[in-house]
Image (cartoon, helix red, strand yellow):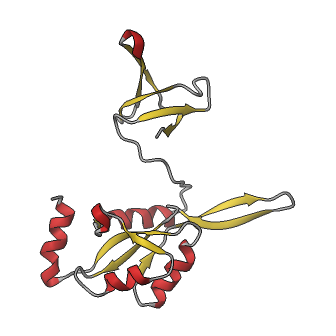
Amino acid sequence: MNTATQKAQENAAGAAPLWYAVRLRSRHEKVAAEQLRKLGIETYLPLVTQIHQWSDRKKRVEVPLFSGYAFVKFEPGSEVRLRVLKTHGVVGFVGPRWEQTPVPELQIRHIQGILESGTQVEEHPYLKAGQRVRIRGGALAGVEGILSSLNPDRSLVITVEPIGRSISIRIEGYEVEVLE
């Protein structure tokens, strides 16, 4: 059992409100978040401003930082969980077997602080060592391999499987995408 889940269970008796991530229908994030707010549920939908271009114009548009997700805050074990799940546009809670897993308050505050500072930010694929990735753009575009480390000089291991040999390259400064 992870520490966040333990903390939630310990808090269930005294029940300080905790943040939880909810999965929302794609392109319904703002509507679902507004409905949750109207139900009196503390909701945080981090938004970023992007410039979208159509053939005839450009427009500044606020879009969710994490497409398909929002955060709600309530006391563990309260009836609010069921109200959240019944809200139009809510798919479920993020966590094992659709059980809600608390999101640390500090992480929510960090996201809020970064967005309030005006720092340019965009969603990035979640990367972890051992994932198969492909480099996008630059001289190494299309190179695939296993991400071997997440230190500042992120390394990509390219394996020549038939001969059982590998090479390692630094990919700092390159954009990578996770391969399924």
* Residue 50 screen position, x and y as percent: 65, 60
Q: Position of residue 56 (x, y in %)?
A: 87, 60
Residue 173: tell me if it is visible: no
Quadrant of residue 154 in the image? top left
**As drawn, which residue projects farthest toward the right?**
56
Residue placed at 39% from the left, 71% from the top?
92
Left or right of 32: which side holds 74?
A: left
Q: Is residue 8 above or below residue 110?
A: below
Q: Residue 89: where, in percent of width, then height?
A: 51, 76
Determine whether 26 is above or below 163 in the image: below
Residue at horizontal 36%, vertical 40%?
Answer: 128
> Residue 131: which quarter of the image?
top left
Q: Say which residue appears at 56% left-offset and 79% top-offset.
A: 31
Looking at the image, can residue 156 be seen? yes
Residue 15 quadrant:
bottom left
Front in this rendered view, residue 1 or 108: 1
Quarter that holds the N terminus: bottom left
Q: Is residue 108 above or below residue 11?
A: above
Residue 133 x %, y %: 46, 34
Residue reaching furthest to the bottom: 39
